[in-house]
């Protein structure tokens, strides 16, 4: 077990009607003039935004609005938010939505007090020293940004999808989690969220650190509960307890608890970020394609932890690690496909002609020659993993191209 | 799942050598003149206290010392600490020890700024409105007070063992957790600590709240890891990873995470507190006697959750709940006895002639006519549970007394 610091001071207000406390929570965390950041018009038309404005007004907090956040949130709206926030002299942000909205709010929160270009933080050119307080009213569980100190933003011009993490500045001061606000999510949104939660657990579960029994068991418990809950919440989107448990799992998957004392991996996320940036695929759906491919590669190169996952979470009985790992991959694919109705190949993801050269080259340009910590992946490895995401027709076409290129170079 | 607020802002500094950061952490949380509270002379003779003083001195923090905390900490030392702290004008406390030391420091922290008698808070006559900041350097994992908002103090004159809980005031600002500081704990101390941790999980696990799948799975994961780790840490007290995992489990068992969204029970603790208060038994050892008796009672009155524990944690295969619950009790007793070498009866606990009338009467005087929430226990129920803690000879003697009393009243 590695040394660690764990500091997670977000206040979670969880349950039916908890959004009524938003004004009080924003006030108690020091905000008097708040920018509400949101995405779809939906939160306006369903009355949520009005209810929140009333809660803020009642305690004397002024409100500025910034709508229009899209999935895979982009830098242009962050620039717009920074300008608006400075002009209106805001002293706090309230993100109303899911990960994209929260990440946009966090980037604006760092950008407003910073004299330079906020992208400096994402490009690694500067470290944030201050940020306005961010509060959250969560409507789309999955990204876990409501309890994390991270934000991920895409630079439109260059298709770069990069992240900043600083627990002391970017963890939300409070997060309002009302499961009823998630009743109207579609099956697709729900499933993408569940894959994202599972990925946050798995990126920490797959570690080279030994002696991390407690966190392993917690991670396995969260995964088992999500596997049990998924069919319930998909069968009845208004099942309060199922929605509530999924939402709380989402937060715990990514608030740092699952990573205590261990090196984290994050290579699946890095590989998926390139897919999102190049082809605009939904993050959760992209992860459903990447994770089993990554696990299948590991079944042959370092099966131990994949085998443990198989045995403890999926009840796999094989005694040798490689067989248990291969069976774990099959079970994970079956769950993603049969229960969550997620794509399992690039083709099913809508990427008909993936440019694997470009994906590998961008990935290692962003992440260096090797990535991951459970197993260090070289460009040859990541190429192989991307190839494991192709369907049969794509593989045949790739083989044909390689044969041609082999003939040409021969 | 019930509505809840979860706010756990304690900063955990975990790992080898983490106590070197104590001065910095105390300084950052606002302390300039600190009272170090400790128990045994051991922390003085092994050099820990000197190292902590150096760390505090180096950053300009003045130090006052208060030693002599005993297990089942008492009010007299709290009064002494309040007086000393006021005279020396301290502005923070540093608890160096286990639960008794931390609980004493918390009581002093509430008492110093309060104009009345600090016992008012425990007697329910007043609510604490402020408290000095408390930091912790943990040397005995188990009680979980390093991450909780509770304190338990015994009033010597009346043998009352009562608690106060206020998350906003009493959660430590920081907790330094260095597993190497626990290497010298005896097998008895280690085992008592593990029972205490398991009890903190079980008091929350046994709930009447439905739809709490995520927290159930987390609780089961923590219990499984403790059951795996216990033989390792007892076989090799200097096994760093085993000690580290046990210590982190101790904190997570009691920082509130396991209770999110559910009614908690706490009747086993209430029953044990009477044993400690009347007979001075060690809390963890007392719990090893109380918990299986409580579970055995539930196997016959409300077996469902005991059965789930048996199936998921101990691998019990019985399909009907009562059989599964009875088997779970047997497995729990076997673990406490064969692995942890804990007593399982009042007799083995050193209470040769328990006064069950007195225990039941004091219990319900403190807790009201009914206690617990998984199953509401009447005085007739708690009497039955206390009787389940008797060994055969004690049971025979009890039966004899009852026969005599029956004859006399006839």
Image: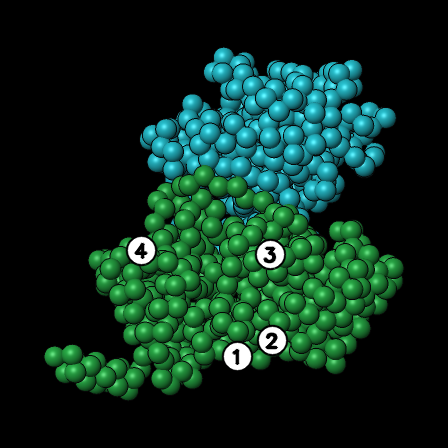
Chain colours: A cyan, B green
In the picture, measured across the screen, residue B379 lies left or right of residue A200, that is left
Between marks 1 and 3, how big is the CA–CA gap?
Answer: 23 Å
> Which numbered disc, 4 or 3, marks the residue that appears first in the sequence?
3
Cα–Cα span, label 1 and label 2: 16 Å
Q: Earlier in the sequence, mark 3 or mark 2?
A: 2
Q: Residue at x 54, y 16 (%)?
A: A50
- Quickly name the residue at label 3: B147
Chain label for disc 2: B
Asked whether residue B243 is in view, the answer is no
Specify whether disc 4 shares its chain with disc 2: yes
- Identify which residue, A16 or B317, lies in the foreground: A16
Circle 4 SS class: loop
Tell me the CA gap for discs 4 and 1. 31 Å
Question: Do marks 3 and 2 share a subunit?
Answer: yes
Label 3 environment density (alpha carbons within 10 Å; few <14, some 14–19, many ≥20)? many
Q: Which residue position is annotated with label 1?
A: B188
Q: Are marks 1 and 2 in contact (CB under 8 Å)?
A: no
Q: Nearer the viewer, residue B362 or A280?
A: B362
Asked if labels 3 and 1 touch by Cβ distance under 8 angstroms, the answer is: no
From the top left corner, tell me how far across and down residue B167 is, in percent: 58, 50
Inter-mark Cα distance, 4 to 3: 28 Å
Q: Quadrant of residue B320?
A: bottom left
N-terminal of the pair, mark 1 or mark 2, is: 2
Disc number for residue B70: 2
Q: Which residue is mark 4?
A: B375
* Residue B218 screen position, x and y as percent: 46, 52
Note whether residue A94 is visible: yes
């Amino acid at each position: 077990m590695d040394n660690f610091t764990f500091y997670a001071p977000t206040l979670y207000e969880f349950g039916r009607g908890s959004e009524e406390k938003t004004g009080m929570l924003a006030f108690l965390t020091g905000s008097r003039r708040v920018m509400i950041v949101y995405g779809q018009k939906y939160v306006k038309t369903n009355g949520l935004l009005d209810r929140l404005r009333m809660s803020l007004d009642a305690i004397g907090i002024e409100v500025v609005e910034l709508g229009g956040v899209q999935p895979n949130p982009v830098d242009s709206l962050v620039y717009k938010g920074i300008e608006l926030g400075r002009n209106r002299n805001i002293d706090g942000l309230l993100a109303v939505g899911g990960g994209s909205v929260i990440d946009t709010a966090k980037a604006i929160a760092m950008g407003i007090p910073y004299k330079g270009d906020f992208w400096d933080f994402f490009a690694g050119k500067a470290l944030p020293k201050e940020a306005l307080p961010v509060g959250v009213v969560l409507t789309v569980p999955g990204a876990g940004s409501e309890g994390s100190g991270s934000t991920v933003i895409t630079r439109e011009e260059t298709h770069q999808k990069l992240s900043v993490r600083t627990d002391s500045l970017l963890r939300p001061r409070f997060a309002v989690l009302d499961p009823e606000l998630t009743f109207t999510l579609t099956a697709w949104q729900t499933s993408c969220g569940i894959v994202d939660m599972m990925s946050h657990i798995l990126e920490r579960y797959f570690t080279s650190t030994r002696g991390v029994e407690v966190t392993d068991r917690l991670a396995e418990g969260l995964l088992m509960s999500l596997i049990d809950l998924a069919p319930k919440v998909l069968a009845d989107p208004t099942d309060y307890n199922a929605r509530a448990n999924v939402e709380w799992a989402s937060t715990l998957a990514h608030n740092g608890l699952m990573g205590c004392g261990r090196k984290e991996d994050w290579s699946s996320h890095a590989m998926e970020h390139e897919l999102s940036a190049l082809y605009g695929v939904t993050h959760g759906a992209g992860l459903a394609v990447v994770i089993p491919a990554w696990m299948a590669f590991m079944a042959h190169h370092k099966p131990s932890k994949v085998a443990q996952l198989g045995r403890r979470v999926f009840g796999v009985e094989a005694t040798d690690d490689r067989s248990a790992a291969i069976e774990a991959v099959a079970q994970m694919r079956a769950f993603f496909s049969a229960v969550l109705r997620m794509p399992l190949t690039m083709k099913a993801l809508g990427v008909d002609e993936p440019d694997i050269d470009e994906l590998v080259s961008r990935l290692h340009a962003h992440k260096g020659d090797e990535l991951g910590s459970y197993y260090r992946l070289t460009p040859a490895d990541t190429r192989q993993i991307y190839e494991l995401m192709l369907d049969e027709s794509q593989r045949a076409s790739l083989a044909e191209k390689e044969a041609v290129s082999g003939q040409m170079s021969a």
